[in-house]
Amino acid sequence: MARVQNDSLSAELASLRIDRTGPSRGSSSPSPPVRGTQGGLSKRWIALLAVAGVGAVSAVSARPLLARVQRPVVRMTEIAQVAPSQASVELTATGYVVAQRTAKVGAKVQGRITKTNAHEGDRVHQGDVLFELDPTDQRRELAAARARVEVARAKVQVARATLAETERSLAREKKLAASGAVAVATAEDLETRSLSLSASVAAAEAEIKAASADAARIEAALHDMRVLAPIDGVLTTKPLEVGEVVTNETPLVEILDPASLLVEVDVPEGRAGAVAVEAPCEIVLDAFPNDRHRGQVVMVGPRLNRAKATALVKVKFLDPVPELRAEMAARVGFLREALDPEKLHAAPQTVVSKSAIVERGGQKFVFALRGDAVHLERVTLGEALGGRFVLAEGPSSGTRVAENPGPDLMDGQMVKESEAK
């Protein structure tokens, strides 16, 4: 259709002619009018130019609009707070606080709980009575065993008395037999009886030992009706209640020794060589992220975890931590040198990655993520800490900012956060 319009326009241009002859002298008749196409041609050109101008203006104005509508994928980093001591951190690993000394308390004998002397969370000492079991049956058995001991002792006394009497008769009969007053057979019978009575005495004495041992066993069982704490520590589970029947396989409560709490972290196999026993560390508990504690490596695992390709490292606290609990999550920073107490208690600083800084008009900015869009926010930078700057003024800690923003990224532009780590 455009070609047809161009052909028509060319034909009209070709038909334009200027009459240069003019009217004859003396002639009063007017000249014939020039073909009236010039006004129509001007209108067409004006219309074409207007359409072209509108298209150019639309293209220019649409560029910012398209830039805002399109959502480029942007990698984000976070403005963080770090302690001054972290400048000497060579390696960081995460793990948990684990007790190295625990005890599961159980009863040695079967019985019914009649008294519970401790509750979950109580601190106990070695030898404290935690539970008392019903001792009625054991007391009865002990009384019966002691009675058997007395019976055995009485048997021994009777056997010894009979033996003594028989030995005196034997001595007298031997004298009479030697003088011929009595038959030798009578003396021999008494001698045989004396030997039998000696064996009876020995059996009665053995019976005393057996009865005494049985009584001692029952007495020990009676003593075991009181369940004692095997170690100093804290009760970490709820104890069984009064009235419950337990056996020697029933766990009653678990005790944890707080003095044995260490942080266990997994260090990648490739970095395990950088960790040595007695190396200084900084420990931060997730429950108290603003508190930092001095630590020291006490053990590097002799074996690696094949599945995770890591080495187990145990770190102890050098200072008491009253709020420390087992299974707390912790982060350990392995240091090049021991912590300076001033740095340990120095306030943390807000830092931003160097890769997030952009310059616009001679000033420093970051693209801060607010909702689904990034916005330019001016920052004032302090000293450099490795690949980061101390942030004197700017967005608060925790703000996510664009990392390595391209020159086409605009203020207020909608973005999509990269999933790559």
Image: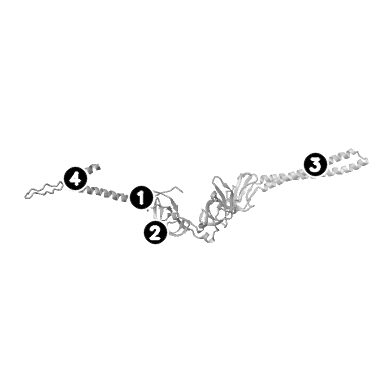
Disc 3 and disc 2: Cα gap in Å?
Answer: 113 Å
Q: Residue placed farthest to the front in the image?
A: 21
Residue designated by label 3:
200
Residue 415 located left or right of residue 173: left
N-term-proximal mark, 4 vs 1: 4
For the point 69% across and 47% down, which residue is it?
A: 220
Query: Which residue lies under the disc numbered 4?
Result: 14
Secondary structure type for disc 4? helix
For label 4, the crowd category at 10 Å Cα-Cα, with few meaning under 14, some 14 to 19 and many 20 or more, is: few
Across and down, in percent, residue 237 comes to 57, 49
Name which residue type carries label 3.
Ser
At label 1, the amino acid type is Ala
Disc 3 versus disc 4: distance between alpha carbons?
A: 158 Å
**Which one is earlier in the sequence, the residue at label 3 or at label 1?**
1
Q: Position of residue 351 (x, y in %)?
A: 46, 57
The amino acid type found where label 2 is placed reads Gln
Q: In the image, is 77 to the left or to the right of 271?
A: left
Disc 2: CA contacts within 10 A as few (<14), some (14-19) or many (>=20): few
Q: How is the image coloured?
A: one colour
Label located before the other in sequence (3 or 2): 3
| Residue 373 numbered tag | none
Depth check, front residue: 244 or 78: 78
Q: Earlier in the sequence, mark 4 or mark 2?
A: 4
Q: Which residue bears the numbered disc 2?
A: 363
User: Callout 2: helix, strand or loop?
Assistant: strand
Q: Is residue 347 above or below residue 72?
A: below
